[in-house]
Image (cartoon, rainbow, N blue to C red):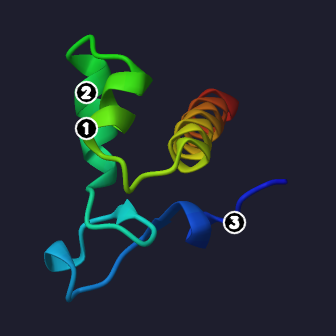
Amino acid sequence: MLMTREQIIERDEDVLGGMPVFAGTRVLAKTLTDYLEAGDTLDEFLDNFPSVKRSQAIAFLELARTSLEAQISHAYSD
């Protein structure tokens, strides 16, 4: 089943100043990319942030990938 954006990430001014977090948590979405950039695995991230579901993390990475692909495609179509 595909997850909606609202099931993956959310923003609320009352939660961490409106920074994007994994839905239903106080875990910044950026934390996942920071972990991966540092060479950590998805499993290490999930072990340290058990409130984030594996399906959310994978869906977030897929969302980021498709967003980046769209931006690159748009940049080269002009």
User: x and y percent of residue 77 in the render?
Assistant: 69, 32
Looking at the image, residue 54 lies above or below residue 3: above
Looking at the image, residue 77 lies above or below residue 6: above
Mark 2 lies on residue:
35
Mark 3 lies on residue:
4
Cα–Cα span, label 2 and label 3: 24 Å
Position of 44 with respect to 34 (left or right) is: right
What is the residue that sits farthest to the right in this orientation?
1
Q: Reading the chain from its start, which is encountered first: label 3 or label 1?
A: 3
- Asked whether disc 3 touches disc 1, contact meaning CB atoms under 8 Å apart, the reply is no
Residue occupying the point 33% across, 64% down: 20
Q: Amino acid at mark 1?
A: Asn
| Quadrant assignment, res 62 | top right
What is the residue that sits farthest to the bottom in this orientation?
14
Helix, strand or loop for disc 2: helix
Position of 64 with respect to 70 (left or right) is: left
Cα–Cα span, label 1 and label 2: 10 Å
Q: Reading the chain from its start, which is encountered first: label 1 or label 2?
A: 2
Q: Badge 2: few (under 14), some or many (20 or more) residues near its Cα, within 10 Å?
A: some
Mark 1 lies on residue:
48
Q: Amino acid at mark 3?
A: Thr
Residue occupying the point 28% across, 45% down: 30
Helix, strand or loop for disc 3: loop
User: x and y percent of residue 21 in the render?
Assistant: 34, 63
| Quadrant assignment, res 41 | top left
User: x and y percent of residue 52 in the render?
Assistant: 42, 52
